[in-house]
Image: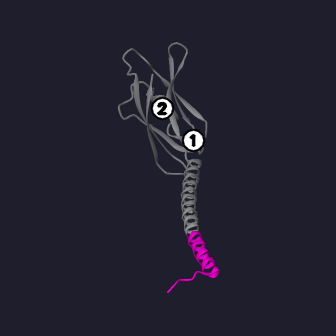
Amino acid sequence: MAIAIEPGDIIAGLAFLFSIYATVKTIQFNNRQQSLIESQEKLNNLLLEKEAADSAGERQANLCAAFIRLGSSKYRLKIWNKGKSVARNVSLEFPEGNDVLMEGDIKEKFPLEVLDTHQSVELIAVIHMGTKPKHAIRLIWSDEYSERNEKLVYATL
């Protein structure tokens, strides 16, 4: 019994091979499409996280403190708000003690009701030979983000 191959069999075989090729390419395309969808989803999630962080940053005050030198022997402790929101009820604490700032100056200015963005307040510092070069200062305030924010700053002379 001889097998006879007719032109229709060749065309059917080529169609079968072409359908296998098309199926493989479709599967490859779908896999690439799925990886693109996953990466786009990751990017969208990162963008949402970034927007949430930016939104939170818009509602936060960021207080800083540093000693500044005026002339040869005069110093001030400058406290400023570099955040994007207003700081309210600003107060200071000295975890390691205060031996450099004048208590009367602190009591006169703090607690500070409002410290606007880029606004600052200065306290008179009394520096002498026995003064420590580094001072721990805890800044406490409230803003739109939270009712109680704390930041421990180490101001150096």
Which mark sits nearer the N-terminus, 1 or 2?
A: 1
Along the line of sight, the residue nearer the viewer: 105 or 152: 152
- Horizontal side of 2 relative to 99 (left or right) equals right
Residue 6 x, y percent position in the rendering: 62, 81
Q: Nearer the viewer, mark 1 or mark 2?
A: 1
Badge 1 crowding class, 10 Å Cα cut-off, few under 14, some 14 to 19, many 20 or more, is: some
Along the line of sight, the residue nearer the viewer: 14 or 94: 14
Residue 23 x, y percent position in the rendering: 57, 71
Mark 1: secondary structure: loop
Residue 95 x, y percent position in the rendering: 36, 35
- Which secondary structure class fits the magenta region best? helix
| Residue that appears at 55% across and 58% down | 39
The Cα atoms of the two marked residues, 1 and 2, are separated by: 22 Å
| Residue that appears at 55% across and 47% down | 60
Residue 8 x, y percent position in the rendering: 64, 81
Along the line of sight, the residue nearer the viewer: 129 or 110: 129
Looking at the rendered structure, the number of numbered marks drawn on it comes to 2
| Residue that appears at 36% across and 17% down | 130
User: What is the residue that sits farthest to the bottom in this orientation?
Assistant: 1
Q: Which residue is mark 2?
A: 106
Quarter where residue 31 is shown: bottom right
Mark 2: secondary structure: helix
Q: Which residue is mark 1?
A: 83
Q: Amino acid at mark 2?
A: Ile
Q: Which mark is residue 63?
A: none
Above or below residue 115? Residue 69 is: above
Asked if the stretch drawn in magenta spans residue 13, the answer is yes
Query: In the rendered structure, which segment of residues is drawn in magenta?
Result: 1-23
Above or below residue 131? Residue 120 is: below
